[in-house]
Amino acid sequence: MSKIVRAVVAVVLGGAVAAVGVAAPAGATPPGIPSKATAQTQLNALTVATEGSMSGYSRDKFPHWITISGTCDTRETVLKRDGTSVATSSACAATSGRWYSPYDGATWTAASDVDIDHVVPLAEAWRSGASAWTTAKRQSFANDLTHPQLIAVTDNVNQSKGDQDPSTWLPPLTSYRCTYARMWINVKYTWSLKLQSAEKSALQALLNAC
């Protein structure tokens, strides 16, 4: 069964579970998601500029995943944070659990079906000002657990996003788009990244619809 078909099945089954009153798994909840009003203030403060070049870009310039605690790296830390009933091996690898992807509404029981999305992609950050950062600062950005920059989602949905901004890609689940916009804005504001005119227009439209 393909990943897409399994995702559809998961959504359908999730609806059936909810219908009989069984609690569905909690969704991924990154920290620091601002209110609509705060996100609006942050969006107003962002600098609009022409997107920078990809010249010199490499994911290796944003070292990830790094050790967070004991044997646990950033990916494993987010898997535990965003999952339900997650069990791990002595090496901190997730061996079982349930992960609800708020981007598309699918639930997975294998960690291999889940990616950790950088809400503001690394390449987008590079084009928005991170090209001028030190490697240490880019590492902090790529492993930021304090702000809403990392979230566990369905892997192929994350792959379809690539390095696109909200003017060209949004989560398939429309009910999550307001949250996604507030997360995106907060990350760009926190890290003093610039945004394009089309990107700002898309974010404003999303906030207006919240």
Image (tube, rainbow, N blue to C red):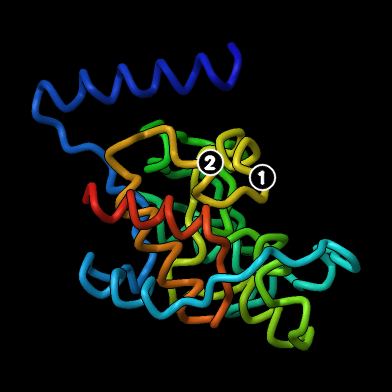
- For image coordinates 46% across by 60% down, the residue present is 200
Direction right: furthest residue: 56
Image-based side of 52 in relation to 109, left or right: right
Given residues 50 and 38, the one toward you in this image is 50
- Find the residue positioned furthest to the left: 21
Whether residue 187 is visible, yes or no, is yes
Q: CA distance from mark 2 to mark 1?
A: 9 Å
Q: Which mark is residue 12?
A: none
SS type, badge 1: loop
Label 1 CA crowd tier, 10 Å (few <14, some 14–19, many 20+): some
Q: Amino acid at mark 1?
A: Gly
Question: Which residue is tagged 2?
Answer: 169
Query: Residue 144, how many percent across, how many down?
Result: 54, 75
Which callout, 2 or 1, points to the residue nearer the camera? 2
Which amino acid lies under the numbered mark 2 shown in the image of this protein? Trp
Residue 13 figure quarter? top left
Whether residues under marks 2 and 1 lie with C-beta atoms below 8 angstroms apart, the answer is yes
**Residue 15, horizontal then vertical, whole percent:** 23, 22
Front position in the image: 102 or 208: 208
Where is residue 17? Give x, y as percent: 20, 24
- For the image, the number of numbered tags is 2
Circle 1 is placed at which residue position? Answer: 162
Q: Residue at x 82, y 61 (%)?
A: 54
